[in-house]
Image (spheres, helix red, strand yellow):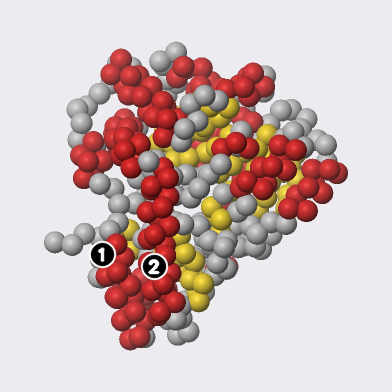
Amino acid sequence: MSRTVLLNPGPVNVTDRVRQALMLPDLCHREKEFTDLMAAIRAKLLRAFDIEEEYTSVLVSGSGTAALEMAVSSSLSPGRSMLVIQNGVYGERIGKICDIYQFNRHTIKLSWGEPPNLEDIEKELKENPDIEVVALVHHETTTGLLNPLKEVGELARRYEKIYLVDCISSLAGDEIDFKSIDIAVGTANKCIQGFPGVSFVLLREKDLERLRKIPERSLYFNLTGYHKAQEKGGLLFTPAIPAHYALDVALDELIEETVASRVQRYADAAKILRTGFKDIGLEFLIPEGWRSNCLTGLRLPKGVGYEKLHAELKANGFIIYAGQGNLSDTIFRIANMGDITNEEFERFLQILKTTCSNF
């Protein structure tokens, strides 16, 4: 029996090995077995991305947005401001978090899918010395745009700013140079190929002293509070234990495959899909050179409504993803995250081609 293939940007299809981890024995989170598991996961995160020497990790139960709110709310010193680069839903989400915490912020606001101009970013940094943190979404899944991570990071480093990056939809799927990143946010249920329920923050050890001086602003999303507890083998709140079991196995798989190999596998999958989309005659939302390995935004063909397209593909075992906001009626999105075979991608393209020709 063929399975349902998830072509949405998380949750993703996982391996049987990861799925079986959910069936491990019931466990009290206050027992040594869980604190050992948590310590292993934190270490594997650093090992997988080869950042063990300079970084530490913090786990939090919740979606990627939980880790993002933790990082944003815990990283800004009183009286300073954050520069937020917005060109999609998730950059705008960072801005919303800043507003909820009543942070001072400067914003570079662009159309969804429009890459930022580095000169505009440098101008903001030159003219606003109050900026302490620069915040960017690496892969904006709103459109499939891959923002210029390294180049923005070089500017942040030149002007001695903290660089906070939402890597939720790119970590282990797109190439990431950690040299300029101070704080990176990730989650289990996208390119790491685990289950929803646990996310994490990766941060430089040397920044901990500065972070500890920042007043606590949240009970649940207190980054340094979590770090202190986890370093001592403790935890502040009840975690999603099954999701941790699965993340531990997913990280084993990632380390075995290597991050570089997974990034290449996703790039190869994207090439298969995009070649097929061209053959069908679909129009790409993002120009070549700016696209993530992990997701492709496509304009709906003339006369084809998303709901009908979704229903037809779902009936054939494939889940696609709608556009958001003002793009909801004009685009659809195809992600290639997770444990999906090339044969499944080819079968999807055949069904998509037939479906589009029948409308």
Residue name at image x 31 percent, y 65 percent = 345
Answer whether residue 7 is visible to the viewer in this image.
Answer: yes
Residue name at image x 45 percent, y 85 percent = 303
Locate residue 1 relative to residue 91 in the image: left or right. left
**Which amino acid type is marked by label 1?**
Glu
Above-or-below relation of 130 to 346:
above
Q: Which mark is residue 273?
A: 2
Residue name at image x 72 percent, y 43 percent = 155
Disc 2 residue crowd, few under 14, some 14–19, many 20+, Cα 10 Å: many
Residue name at image x 38 percent, y 22 percent = 39
Observer-nearest of 218 and 224: 224
Residue 94, horizontal then vertical, whole percent:
61, 45
Locate residue 328 relative to residue 78 in the image: left or right. left
Locate residue 230 relative to residue 194 in the image: left or right. right
Secondary structure of the residue carrying tag 1 is helix
Above-or-below relation of 314 to 136:
below
Secondary structure of the residue carrying tag 2 is helix
Q: Would you name the residue on which mark 1 appears? A: 343
